[in-house]
Image (tube, rainbow, N blue to C red):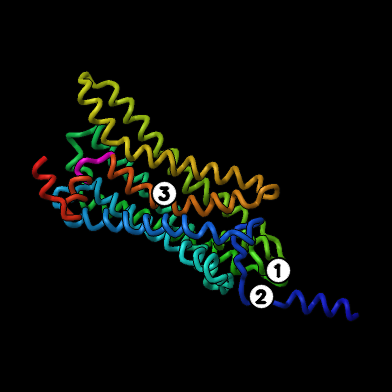
């Protein structure tokens, strides 16, 4: 009878907070990772803010392609800021506790910003497709109203479809363990602590990945396949080179984003053997693209480089050249 009473009391108990343990397997020296992660975060913040200021400051950059780039910069700042302050707090101050509402809010923000980044990449691919394959229709098709509509569509799609992720996780009963071997509140990492069945959580996570990220990736690569096919039919070598150079920066970032996403997903299969690797890759995938995107665009886009120099007070040097 006492045993039955204890089981009943335990099943009614609900943990009040989760403990984010950090990087599994290296807890004793994980604080050494704080410096490179902090530098990546500062780089992501600084570079993306510079892009936003430059696009706002330079009239020549008030074009749909750069509007999408500015939206991508905002998403990158949001994605990095969703996870990095908490990770640095864990590594520097051992602030591992996180309340359930905060954890579920972080879970929602991570899924929203990650899928929004994918959606913006799709918008940028469509923009380049129309610009290169139908240049005479570009100005009448990709207008400011078009940019606003597709951006709002991406926000609504991702904002609504990711709501069930934290809601389903919050409905679970967490009655015993509350230590998460992770630096952030990942959906499956949190729900693995639940005392009841999480089949629906796993199913929705998989469905979300296929419906949003899978469809975006398919449409993005289809767009660039059509772009490359159209460019190769151009008679002028100079026109071909210019067209490929225009979309090369987009393609580099898109390939990195989706390749890293696939690698992170596959590596999770080996989580039981080497749990540190998928956690590290998960964190890096949330902070490296925000830091990398501005640098790639700065290196590959002359108009943006000129804008950077003017904003940073190097306009006289640009004028001389």
Callout 3–callout 2 Cβ contact below 8 Å: no
Label 3 neighbour load within 10 Å: few <14, some 14-19, many 20+: many
Q: Residue at x 22, y 21 (%)?
A: 237
Q: Mark 1 points at which residue?
A: 177
Q: In which quarter of the image is residue 171?
A: bottom right
How many marks are shown on the rendered structure? Answer: 3
Q: Where is residue 200 in the image (x, y as percent from the top left)?
A: 63, 57
Residue in the image at 48% along x and 57% along y: 111
Secondary structure of the magenta portion, mostly? helix
Q: Distance between the residues labelled 3 and 2?
A: 35 Å
Q: Tell me where the magenta segment starts and ends, as one range.
A: 300-304
In the picture of the structure, the residue carrying the numbered disc 2 is: 15
Badge 2 local density, few (<14 within 10 Å), some, or many (20+)? some
SS at badge 3: helix
Q: Residue furthest top?
A: 235
Give the mark nearest the N terminus, 3 or 1.
1
Q: Distance between the residues labelled 3 and 1?
A: 33 Å
Quadrant housing the C terminus: top left
Q: Which mark is residue 289?
A: 3
């Amino acid at each position: 009878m006492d045993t039955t009473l204890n089981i009943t009391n335990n099943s009614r108990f609900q943990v009040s907070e989760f403990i984010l343990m950090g990087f599994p397997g290296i807890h004793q020296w994980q604080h050494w990772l704080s410096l490179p992660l902090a530098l990546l975060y500062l780089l992501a913040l600084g570079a993306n803010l510079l892009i936003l200021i430059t696009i706002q400051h330079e009239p020549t950059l008030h074009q749909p392609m750069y509007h999408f780039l500015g939206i991508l910069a905002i998403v990158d700042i949001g994605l990095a800021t969703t996870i990095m302050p908490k990770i640095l707090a864990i590594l520097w101050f051992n602030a591992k506790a996180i309340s359930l509402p905060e954890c579920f809010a972080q879970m929602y923000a991570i899924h929203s910003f990650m899928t929004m980044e994918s959606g913006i990449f799709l918008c940028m691919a469509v923009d380049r497709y129309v610009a290169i394959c139908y240049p005479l229709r570009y100005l009448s098709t990709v207008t400011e109203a078009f940019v606003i509509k597709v951006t709002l569509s991406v926000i609504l799609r991702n904002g609504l479809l990711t709501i069930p992720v934290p809601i389903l996780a919050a409905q679970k009963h967490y009655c015993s363990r509350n230590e998460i071997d992770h630096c952030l509140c990942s959906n499956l990492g949190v729900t693995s602590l639940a005392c009841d069945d999480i089949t629906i959580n796993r199913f929705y996570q998989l469905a979300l990945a296929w419906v949003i990220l899978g469809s975006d990736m398919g449409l993005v690569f289809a767009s660039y396949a059509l772009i490359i096919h159209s460019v190769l039919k151009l008679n002028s070598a100079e026109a071909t080179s210019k067209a490929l150079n225009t979309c090369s920066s987009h393609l580099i970032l898109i390939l990195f984003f989706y390749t890293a996403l696939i690698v992170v997903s596959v590596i999770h299969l080996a989580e039981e053997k080497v749990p540190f690797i998928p956690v590290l890759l998960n964190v890096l995938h949330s902070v490296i693209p925000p830091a990398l995107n501005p640098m790639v665009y700065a290196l590959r886009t002359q108009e943006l480089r000129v804008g950077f120099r003017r904003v940073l007070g190097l306009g006289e040097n640009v004028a001389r050249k």
